[in-house]
């Protein structure tokens, strides 16, 4: 891989180096045609950790294509970013930027939950997967999911899970996610 493509910035939410170690060929059921890599997602695109300066690059706008974001100010974004940043090796918010226009065009989060069970193991959760509507169909959603799935494995998670709508099940199944019989209920209280 070209190490110049993934550069660590002190304002990144996590160390970018970890993305360099991801080898997409390890996900045997997921294929990329044309081939892409975490270090080369496509012309002018880069895959990288969320950065403290990404508010002005359209990060909230990207999330608003997934769900209601609310009227989040830059100050609120920075506060939330700093809270996450203080939780070492917990929030792996990963984005794709189109450097030709300086805009965030995709994002997905790997959240690591520390456990006491299973010998103080770690569980991973995938959250907030979204690709800008203008960039869909270019394998970027697949790249984000593949990268986070392999990252979860690399950091030693004993399991990785997510919640999704019925129509998204086939998408996630290609990465190895399965609905476990008798254990696949997702329960919620909304406040
Ligand atoms: C879901 C989403 C992230 C996919 O991003 P994308 O960059 O367009 O996806 P890709 O180009 O990587 O497509 C990957 C594969 O998934 C399939 N796929 C894409 N969107 C899908 C959807 N909504 N339902 C089912 N399959 C889908 C594609 O057909 C493609 O299959 P292929 O590899 O066999 O051709 C994007 O459509 C999105 O942001 N949607 C709105 C937010 C959302 O629903 N997020 C998921 C929350 S659980």
Image: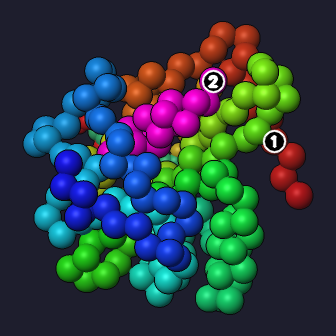
Residue drawn 62% across the image and 25% down it: 159
Q: Nearer the viewer, residue 72 or 143?
A: 143
Relative side of 135 to 96, left or right: left
Quadrant where the C terminus is found in the figure: bottom right
Q: Which residue is mark 1?
A: 188
Point out which mark residue 12 bears: none
Mark 2, residues whose alpha carbon is within 10 Å: few (<14), some, or many (≥20)? few
Q: Which region shows up in magenta?
A: 143-158
Q: Which residue is mark 2?
A: 158
Residue drawn 78% across the image and 21% down it: 119
Ligand 1: which quarter? top left
Name the residue furthest left.
Answer: 34
CA gap, disc 1 to disc 2? 24 Å
The secondary structure type at the circle numbered 1 is: loop
Relative side of 156 to 143, left or right: right
Q: Quadrant of residue 101?
A: bottom left
- Secondary structure character of the magenta stretch overall: helix
């Amino acid at each position: 891989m070209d190490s110049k493509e993934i550069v660590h910035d002190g304002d990144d939410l996590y160390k970018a180096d970890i993305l360099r170690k991801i080898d997409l060929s390890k996900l045997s059921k997921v294929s990329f045609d044309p081939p892409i890599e975490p270090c080369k997602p496509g012309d002018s695109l880069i895959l990288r950790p969320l950065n403290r300066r990404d508010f002005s690059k359209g990060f909230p706008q990207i999330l608003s294509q997934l769900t209601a974001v609310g009227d989040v100010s830059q100050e609120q974004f920075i506060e939330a970013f700093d809270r996450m940043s203080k939780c070492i090796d917990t929030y792996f918010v990963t984005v794709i930027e189109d450097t030709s226009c300086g805009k965030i065009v995709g994002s997905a989060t790997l959240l690591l939950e520390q456990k006491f069970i299973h010998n103080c193991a770690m569980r991973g959760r995938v959250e907030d997967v979204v690709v800008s509507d203008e960039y869909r169909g270019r394998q970027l959603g697949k790249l984000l999911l593949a990268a986070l799935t392999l990252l979860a494995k690399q950091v030693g998670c004993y399991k990785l899970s997510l919640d999704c709508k019925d129509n998204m099940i086939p998408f996630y199944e290609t990465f190895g996610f399965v609905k476990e019989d008798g254990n696949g209920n997702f329960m919620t209280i909304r406040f």
